[in-house]
Image (cartoon, rainbow, N blue to C red):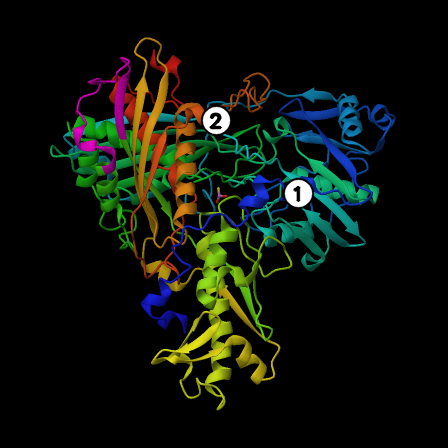
Amino acid sequence: MSDAAPRQIRHGSNLGQPLTRRDGILKVTGAAAYAADHHPPGMLYAVTAVSRIARGRVAHLDVAAAEGHPGVVAVMTPQNRPALARHPDEKTDGFTFRLDLLQDDRVRYANQPVAVVIAETLEAATEGAALLNPAYEAETPAVGLDAAQAFTPPAIGVGDPADMAKGDVESGLAAASRRIEATYETPAQYHNAMEPHAVVATWDGDRLDLDMPSQGLAMAQGRIAGLFGISPADIHIRSPFLGGGFGSKGMIAGPQVLGIMAARLVGRPVKLVMSRPQMFGPVGHRAPTRQTLRLGATEDGGLTALDHETLTATSTFDDFIEPSGGVSHTLYAAPALATRHRAVRLDTGTPLFMRAPGEASGSAALEAAIDEMAEACGMDPLEFRLRNYAETEPATGKPFSSKALRECYARGAEAFGWSRRPLAPGRMRDANGLLVGWGVGTATFPALMFQAEARALLKATGEASVGIGAIDMGQGAWTALAQIAAEELGLDIDAIDFRIGTSDLPNGGIAGGSAHTATAGSAIKGAAADAIAQLADLATQDRRSPLYGAGNAGVVARGGRLVRRDDETRSDGFAEILTRAGRDAVEGKGAAGPDAAREHYAMHAHGAVFAEVTVDPDLGQIRATRLVGAFAAGRIINPRLVRSQYYGGMIWGVSFALHEQAVMDPRTGRPMNANLAEYHVPVNADVPSLEAILVEEEDPHVNPLGIKGVGEIGVTGSAGAIVNAIWHATGKRVRTLPVTLDKLL
Ligand code: MOS
């Protein structure tokens, strides 16, 4: 019935409201308990010892020294770790990644766990781990994109083909009157969520109780159940708050499983929290890329061909291939289009989804190449993008379910002042004599849908509760999803006991792919509609109800009552309807997932990011000074939270363009900057003036709520815009990210 709800109610008090985070006060007062804040009675501390080599084997561990240390309870090694029901290298689906769980003495990458010390105190466990003093048989590690033979991976990302072609790129290039070919490099990046991966594990027989940050509770349950040979229903995970995930908490991490194994070994609750340096290895990263783009264009700036080849890296033992070419499938109307992905196997932890996996690295290269092509055509880079605007998706020919990118370009350009931009580089200076440059980049991210279920309970006591095992990882799910629940139930948000973040609630799917609000929200909408429909059945068939005879489609939920559409003076309260029917409650169930209609459309959010940088002409120091992003992402549930997502994404763009890179020691294969002092991310002083413009967009196809998702799009386009602005300031193209002053001088 809710699909037929009248417009004034759909745009009522809940959707579109800029509510502050409902968990905000808990967080700023420290009352929000994160996983590592829990201390069940009898709990022990586990600390992992990690490998100092990247390839080889552990020849010896001084277990006796560690065991002899006061306070140490046990040392878990390949010799005594609990047996697993399934080898952690066994892959059961595309989301199962191989984990290092002390199965043998092999070392596959630096910082791989080689033992776990369990002790009465954190200090004793830490000291015990240091006493293990491993001896290695080291082999020469493969480090860097040139260290191994490239191969064509069977699939990229989560299962897309490695190669794609439409039309004949070589003829397109031959026919072009302007051509560019450029190679861009992006470094390995590590997610570095503020909250490290952690677990507090308590076994009770074959039942397992976990406090553990997770972006996907049901998937974590399934993986743990498989590894330990227990039922998913016997695993209870609490994950109410995450200090960031960014993809690295999408699947349970190996060290979290080690904490569970340690608890099994000692028969007591165990807490394991990774240290910052240990996170540069077993918990995923964004793989480095080398991307070569070849573009051709006609005299008047029409693309004739676009060729995008990516070389990236995966581990020696598993596959995750950064799908950088995907952005080239969708953004620009090139009649001939080809993308290829190749990979090398390096002695590294397996890469993983990291915020806009593929789109972030791919758009950094594509947007710079488009800028170079515009320059070659003597055109303004925004005009060039409009000249090559894709009215249908270039790779598939499908219509877009909606696409307000033109409005994004226009609104962003207007707010930024783009029309005052000189075409040639090196023409602008600020009051201090610094070079000033302006650049633009297009942002894009697919509008995905995963699977989720939800329930909505309306009770005769007048109480309502809505439950879904959704995850608030800082993006604001606890607020935005509650707004959807309130809207669909016709209740005030504070009148609903709204629960997320534990695995005993219906499967809320994964908080990832920027699809959580769309997916979990659609499930909630379905559950609420089901509950209201049941109530409406009871009321409209009850002669004592003012709604008698209205028919189910003739009523709407509002203010805790069902109201007749044709006569608003006639209504009935939820509690009264249930009491009269002799019912304690109605329980609505909802489910959401991708539907068949999705196959007919290309579904993407879009945006345009405009960047200003200053460059010191003598010292090469670069600062991003201003970013304006205009984004169209379907229906906006909470503009305050959405702006915050866009700001976060644009700051990731600053980081991508100017700061972030993991530097691997070519001799040892160890990351040389595995800490937040040397792995640079923007601090407040690095963050420019930010503006995020929310461009209206209605999408009737994407999902029942018309939501496209806002989590990841902000990083796409932003890095390219900044790099292009650096060229505009200096006339110099730096194609190896991050752009640092040494590369400019
Ligand atoms: Mo995101 S990389 O889908 O958590």
Compared to 586, does 628 lie above or below? above
Q: Residues within 10 Å of mark 1 (few under 14, many from 20)?
A: many
Residue 293 visible:
no
Mark 1 residue CB less than 8 A from any atom of ligand 1 = no
Q: Which amino acid does label 2 sit on?
A: Val
- Quadrant of the rendered image containing residue 68: top right
- What is the tally of numbered marks visible in this picture? 2
Q: In the figure, 237 relative to 353: above or below?
A: below
State the mark number for residue 681: 2
Q: Residues within 10 Å of mark 2 (few under 14, many from 20)?
A: some
Question: In the displayed structure, would residue 291 be above or below residue 320?
Answer: above
Q: In the figure, is residue 108 to the left or right of 202?
A: left
As drawn, the residue found furthest toward the left would be: 299
Q: Residue at x 49, y 38 (%)?
A: 354
Q: Where is residue 23 in the image (x, y as percent from the top left)?
A: 55, 48
Q: Does the magenta stretch include residue 620?
A: no
* Mark sitting earlier along the chain (1/2): 1
Residue 241 visible, this angle: yes
Q: Is residue 421 magenta?
A: yes
- Spot occupied by residue 367 in the image (x, y as percentages of width and height): 30, 33
Determine the image quadrant of residue 586: bottom right
Q: Residue at x 47, y 46 (%)?
A: 158
Please, what secondary structure does the residue beneath circle 1 have? helix
Quarter of the C terminus within the rendering: top left
Q: Which residue lies furthest to the bottom in this view?
A: 543
Q: How far across and down, in percent of the image, does residue 198 sit?
A: 66, 39
Q: What stretch is highlighted in magenta?
A: 415-439
Q: Residue 35 carries which label?
A: 1
The amino acid type, in three-letter code, at marker 1 is Ala
Give the spatial CA distance, label 1 vs label 2. 24 Å
